[in-house]
Amino acid sequence: MSEDAKKRFGTLENRFWGLFAVVCVVLILSKSVKKTPESLPETPSPSSQESVEPIEPIGDWLEWRESDLRVAGARQTFEFGGVEYGFCWIPSGEFDMGSPESERGRLPDETLRRVELTRGFWLLETPVTQKFYRDVVGDNPSFYQGDDLPVEQVRYVDALYFCEELTKRLPGGVKASLPTETQWEYACRAGTTTAYNWGDVWDREKANGSDSAFKTTPSKKYPPNAWGLYDMHGNVWEWTLDDNSSASESSEVAFHIARGGGYDFDAPNCRSASRAKWGDGKGKNTGFRVLIRNDTVLICGI
């Protein structure tokens, strides 16, 4: 090998070993350096975990299970935020939903038909109050302020959100929901077939309509129906789960159904069969009530 060739070979060999040494140093350093916090998977801190105050019944949740022998209007309660809330048992059964053609104030969408409810449920004895709403979702959108007044200016989606948040505070298998339109009217009538659950003639001493207080009134100001439910007529309209498709209507516009009438509506609008078809808006005459169902145990004969 000539002297020039040896020099060139030696230069290439030196470069090779120099590059090899650099690679080795890089590999060694990469193994010795710890991962930075940014490269580690994020672990939620305990403070960032969502926590809610659980609701405990006065008694046992098993007492909220379904029973075919429980009398209509039987009452169960739970305490939340320092207030006791009562729920009335609405049994399974059949009833005539809608209104006869002879009923004053009747509208065409109140077709009279026989309906069966195959399962019972617990229904809040009053509309959701402002304190109850605030304690569950942390807000109070009402125009008329007062802890024991019904919450109003509540959109349909707000009512659904309340039910979701309330369910989080209940044990597994116990769920809160809006009543369906059928469930609401069945509970409102409480076995009656008249325009109102006390008869066919409006009585301003029994409900808050447009001839009464001219604003919302505290829960339990007026007498309850036969199953222990207050304000099923007047005070605030109450959202139900149903939309206009439940009435077999051809309109493609989405409406949600509210029932019961409000403090600023006349007597015909407060009848048991009266229906309001609204969008997702809110008004100072619109609230809701919730039902609770315990699906953990389904038994008969207790």
Image: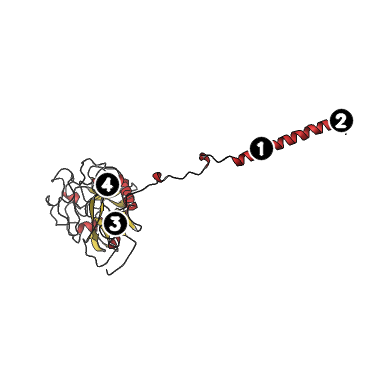
* CA distance for labels 3 and 1: 68 Å
Q: Secondary structure at mark 2?
A: helix
Residue under label 4, please give it. Answer: 133
Looking at the image, residue 210 lies above or below residue 194:
above
* CA distance for labels 2 and 1: 33 Å
Looking at the image, residue 46 lies above or below residue 2:
below
Q: Nearer the viewer, residue 90 or 75?
A: 75
Q: Are marks 3 and 2 in contact (CB under 8 Å)?
A: no
* CA distance for labels 2 and 4: 95 Å
Residue under label 3, please give it. Answer: 292
Q: Amino acid at mark 4?
A: Tyr
Among the 4 quarters of the image, the one containing residue 193? bottom left
* CA distance for labels 3 and 4: 16 Å
Residue at image x 31%, y 45%? 137
Of pointers 3 and 1, the one earlier in the residue sequence: 1
Q: Secondary structure at mark 1?
A: helix
Q: Are marks 4 and 1 in contact (CB under 8 Å)?
A: no
Q: Amino acid at mark 2?
A: Glu
Q: Position of residue 178 (x, y in %)?
A: 29, 53
Work out which quarter of the rendered image holds the N terminus and state it. Answer: top right
Residue under label 2, please give it. Answer: 3
Between tags 2 and 4, which lies in front? 2
Residue under label 1, please give it. Answer: 25
* CA distance for labels 4 and 1: 65 Å
Neighbor class of circle 3 (other Cα within 10 Å; few <14, some 14-19, many 20+) is many
How many numbered badges does the structure rendering display? 4
Q: Position of residue 55 (x, y in %)?
A: 30, 53
Q: Amino acid at mark 1?
A: Val
Neighbor class of circle 1 (other Cα within 10 Å; few <14, some 14-19, many 20+) is few
Q: Amino acid at mark 3?
A: Ile
